[in-house]
Image (cartoon, helix red, strand yellow):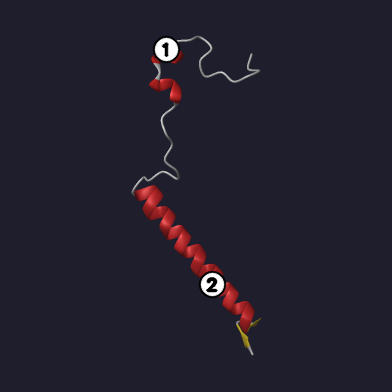
Amino acid sequence: MTTLGMPTSMFLVFVATILAGSAGAIHYVIWHVILGKPFAEVPPPVLAENPDIAARPDAGRGIGDD
């Protein structure tokens, strides 16, 4: 038996994909866009906590940065 020209199992996968995508889009719009929640809480940089290190001219540079 076919639904919309697809076998039943394929139709169920199609419906599940549409529902999952819709739930993800609704979550993104409400949580990240409207409420402004970040994807991950980023801790403040270590350099900002230690003024002695932050005052150095090479602060924040990685090894090999020229």
* Residue 16 in picture, x, y percent from top left: 54, 72
* Residue 18 in picture, x, y percent from top left: 53, 68
Q: Is residue 30 left or right of residue 11?
A: left
Figure disc tally: 2
Q: How crowded is mark 2: few (under 14 residues within 10 Å), some or many (20 or more)?
A: few
Residue that numbered label 2 is attached to = 16
Residue found at x 37% / y 54%: 30
Which label is found at residue 36?
A: none
Q: Which of marks 1 and 2 is nearer the N terminus?
A: 2
Residue placed furthest toward the bottom: 1
* Residue 1 in picture, x, y percent from top left: 64, 90
Q: Is label 1 in a helix, a strand or a loop?
A: helix
Which quadrant is home to the C terminus?
top right
Residue found at x 42% / y 40%: 41
Residue placed furthest toward the left: 35
Residue found at x 63% / y 77%: 10
14 shown above or below 57:
below
Residue that numbered label 1 is attached to = 52
Q: Is label 2 in a helix, a strand or a loop?
A: helix
* Residue 58 in picture, x, y percent from top left: 53, 12
Residue found at x 47% / y 64%: 22
Q: How crowded is mark 1: few (under 14 residues within 10 Å), some or many (20 or more)?
A: few
Q: Kindly identify the amino acid type of the residue bearing the numbered disc 1.
A: Asp
